[in-house]
């Protein structure tokens, strides 16, 4: 009898499954819009100049690879805090902010979830409907019951703001609310700053626990602008969790660069909280890896590299914007009657295109254009060579 006899086959990850299908497709004009990665205009994952320079300096230094502290590289954590809260944050000055380097945004969510389960074992977690598909799985695996709050309104291609707010008002105290701080994945639809202010007010008034997930800082309006929501919550003097990912912003997907930041109510509390968070990390993977974290830390803390990175990030953001504008224009030029102007309002790498799952199937089967069944397309996978073909193909399935 094998130990594994009763192990059932787990369902395939839908997006990775799509990639496998794409890779097996032999049509030369095929296009993969199902991914969650930024590609440059040549269709490649870029290696940023700022990263390259930091890596060259690092190789040159021939540094030994000892263990890092459990919570990671101090300069990395400080850099992550500054990106979130700005240069002169009074909360940082008061010792109320603590950060641990984490294995990507996913790792930050995971250590945050494990720690939350320790301090709020009876709370439920609420995620947006829809949300990044790993949010539910990750919090469930940490032992939580996960519910959804209304978010996307298919009829308007926008936000179902009233229903969202009403859901927050009806939640029991200490419900953990996961919010996408900018560039919502998968829809591309973000609340306005006025709406965010009302959301933050309700979350504070109802004594809910905000867990802000920021995986696309710099892809919306800019590095500073995209932190506005984090700062808005911070100004309301709330204790909260923030998971940062640098996978996209540094184009360092495989290095697993992220951070978990907690805002506490006092310096004394921060000391206790960090000691417990370190136990969570210690019993999961002991301490984070050196390379990606060192590179990000060098870029964040070297003014010349930082300036270069800011420019490169801006170029990625602008290219995505230009692809949104061109897609809308080219669909019109193809004679598509539906109004796609909402694509211009969406932010970040993704767009809920409004295509139905049948239309997505036809796009793939008849044209070799791959999108997620929900209609999510990665705008960052469009480029000057494939956009005409994509627009033509979409026009055909809409005709
Ligand atoms: N959170 C959201 C909303 C995401 O879209 C992603 C990545 O797609 C992550 C977290 C995880 O990021 P990472 O790849 O750094 O683990």
Image (spheres, grey):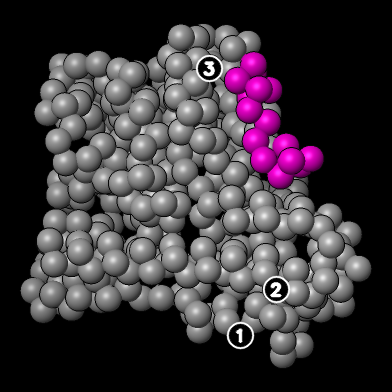
Name the residue carrying label 2: 330
* Residue shown at 52% from the left, 28% from the top: 195
Q: Earlier in the sequence, mark 2 or mark 1?
A: 2
Q: Position of residue 25 (x, y in %)?
A: 75, 82
Select label 3 or label 1 by which is in front: 1
Name the residue carrying label 3: 175
- Comparing 276 with 219, the one in front is 219
Select label 2 or label 1 by which is in front: 2
Q: Is residue 112 in sight in this rendering?
A: no
Q: Is residue 216 left or right of residue 73?
A: right
Query: With respect to residue 307, does 179 lie above or below?
Result: above
Name the residue carrying label 1: 385
* Residue shown at 13% from the left, 67% from the top: 304
Give the residues drawn in magenta, as a range: 153-167
* Residue shown at 50% from the left, 39% from the top: 180
Confirm whether the magenta stretch covers residue 242: no
Q: Position of residue 3 (x, y in %)?
A: 66, 49
**Quarter-of-image position of residue 340:** bottom right
User: Residue 275, labelled with which disc?
Assistant: none
């Amino acid at each position: 009898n094998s130990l594994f006899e009763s192990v059932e086959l787990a369902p395939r990850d839908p997006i990775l499954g799509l990639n496998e299908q794409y890779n097996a497709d032999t049509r030369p004009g095929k296009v993969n819009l199902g991914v969650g990665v930024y590609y440059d205009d040549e269709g490649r994952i870029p290696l940023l100049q700022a990263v390259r320079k930091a890596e060259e300096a690092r190789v040159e230094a021939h540094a030994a690879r000892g263990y890092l502290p459990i919570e990671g590289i101090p300069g990395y954590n400080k850099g992550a805090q500054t990106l979130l809260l700005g240069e002169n944050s009074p909360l940082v000055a008061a010792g109320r902010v603590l950060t641990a380097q984490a294995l990507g945004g996913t790792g930050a969510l995971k250590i945050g979830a494990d720690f939350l389960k320790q301090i709020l074992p009876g709370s439920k977690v609420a995620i947006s409907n829809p949300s990044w598909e790993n949010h539910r799985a990750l919090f469930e695996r940490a032992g939580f019951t996960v519910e959804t709050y209304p978010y996307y309104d298919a009829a308007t291609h926008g936000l179902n703001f009233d229903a969202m707010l009403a859901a927050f008002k009806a939640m029991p105290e200490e419900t953990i609310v996961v919010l996408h701080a900018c560039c919502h994945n998968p829809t591309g639809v973000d609340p306005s700053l006025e709406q965010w202010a009302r959301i933050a007010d309700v979350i504070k008034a109802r004594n809910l626990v905000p867990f802000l997930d920021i995986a696309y800082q710099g892809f919306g309006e800019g590095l500073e602008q995209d932190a506005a929501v984090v700062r808005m919550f911070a100004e309301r003097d709330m204790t909260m969790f923030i998971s940062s990912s640098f996978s996209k912003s540094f184009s360092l997907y495989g290095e697993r660069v992220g951070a978990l930041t907690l805002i506490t109510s006092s310096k004394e509390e921060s000391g206790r909280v960090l000691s417990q968070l370190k136990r969570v990390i210690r019993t999961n993977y002991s301490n984070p890896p050196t390379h990606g974290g060192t590179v990000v830390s060098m870029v964040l803390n070297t003014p010349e590299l930082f300036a270069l990175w800011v420019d490169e990030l801006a170029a990625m953001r602008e290219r995505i914007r230009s692809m949104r504008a061109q897609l809308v224009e080219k669909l019109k030029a193809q004679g598509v009657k539906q109004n796609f102007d909402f694509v211009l309002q969406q932010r970040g790498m993704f767009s809920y295109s409004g295509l139905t799952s049948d239309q997505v199937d036809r796009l793939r089967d008849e044209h070799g254009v791959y999108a997620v069944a929900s209609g999510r397309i990665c705008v960052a996978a469009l480029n000057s060579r494939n956009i005409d073909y994509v627009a033509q193909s979409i026009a055909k399935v809409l005709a």
